[in-house]
Image: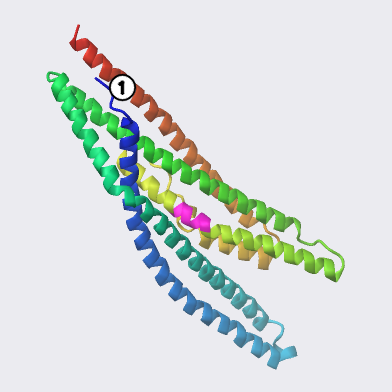
Amino acid sequence: MKPIPNLEKIVGDYKSLQLSKKHLKYLEVKINSESRRLKELKIILEEEHQDVLDLEFKTIRGLFQNILGENEEQYEIEKQEYLMAALQFNEAKKVVGLLNFEKKVLSGKLEREKEIQSQFDKFIFQRNELIATEYPYLSKQLQTISEQLDSDFSFQRELSETIIIAIEVETVIKQMVMYLEEANSLINWGNTWQEINEINYDRNMTIDQAVDLSCKAKQLLQELEEQLEDIYSFRSIKRFSKFEEFLHFNDIYYDRLISDWIVKKKISSSINFLIGTNDSVELVITTLKNQQTLTDRNVEYLKSRQKEVIFESIK
């Protein structure tokens, strides 16, 4: 059977188009959801801030009487709750921005929708005509093999795009670990007041950089989970474990970070959590690459089988 130029690319582009259209719908839902969450978090943040201010006022009024005991403990709790609310609010604000930017990029990509759809329809028509004209007695068998190849070409593209996202997640998490380890190394350094202030500034800057990256990590992890769902529905392959940290990544991360910083004064739990999450992502990448190898082998087998069917018919 004569090869059709760019067959794999045309099918791959068409599959990528389908994934992009589906992801655009997901983004629109996610943007609405995160925007509502942002409004709710703004109210919570204002309430938590007021709680801290109220306790500060009470402490000032009864400086020696209330500075110890329950009031002090309650003040620490209120500060932690306010910090959590602030982290969640800033995260939601940044995630909405990232989602809107991704939507804009994706909308630009979909401007080629008609062109790609036209190429795909033309390719299907040409192939069916070729099979029907040149191999009328083999048309059913060759058509089945061709459809199986189409499915594998689509799956190859889907696996490739999912691996790209997973590797990006891995890179972001490793950067977060690097920043937190740097911040951890700066704890309890400095002798003079000036040295301590400078070190505190550097340490807080690195923690802020890790927090900024956590917003990107959350977005990518959710996108990765979405892509994995597509893979499970596209092919009956062994389901990856549904990692809890993928779904609630930032909530768990912030909780660990606050506990590390306010309670333990040492960043260790947050780093361990990130390393554990990264191990999960690496497992996903390994499994996807193994599936990619199996699919590549099946494509080669189907191409070989296609030639064998034609060769056997002319013996």
Quadrant housing the N terminus? top left
Q: Secondary structure at mark 1?
A: helix
Q: Amino acid at mark 1?
A: Lys
Residue 238 appears in view: no
Q: Which residue is mark 1?
A: 303
The residue shown at (67%, 65%) is 261
Colour mode of the rendering: rainbow
The residue shown at (26%, 39%) is 119
Residue 151, relative to residue 209: is it above or below? above
The magenta-colored residue range is 216-222
Residue 2, x across and y down, in percent: 26, 21
Quadrant housing the C terminus? top left
Residue 21, x across and y down, in percent: 31, 51
The residue shown at (36%, 47%) is 229
Q: How many numbered circles are shown?
A: 1
Secondary structure, magenta segment, majority class: helix
Residue 256, x across and y down, in percent: 59, 61
Between 212 and 267, the one nearer to me in the picture: 212
Displayed quadrant of residue 24: bottom left
As drawn, the residue found furthest toward the left would be 137
As drawn, the residue found furthest toward the top would be 315
Displayed quadrant of residue 270: bottom right
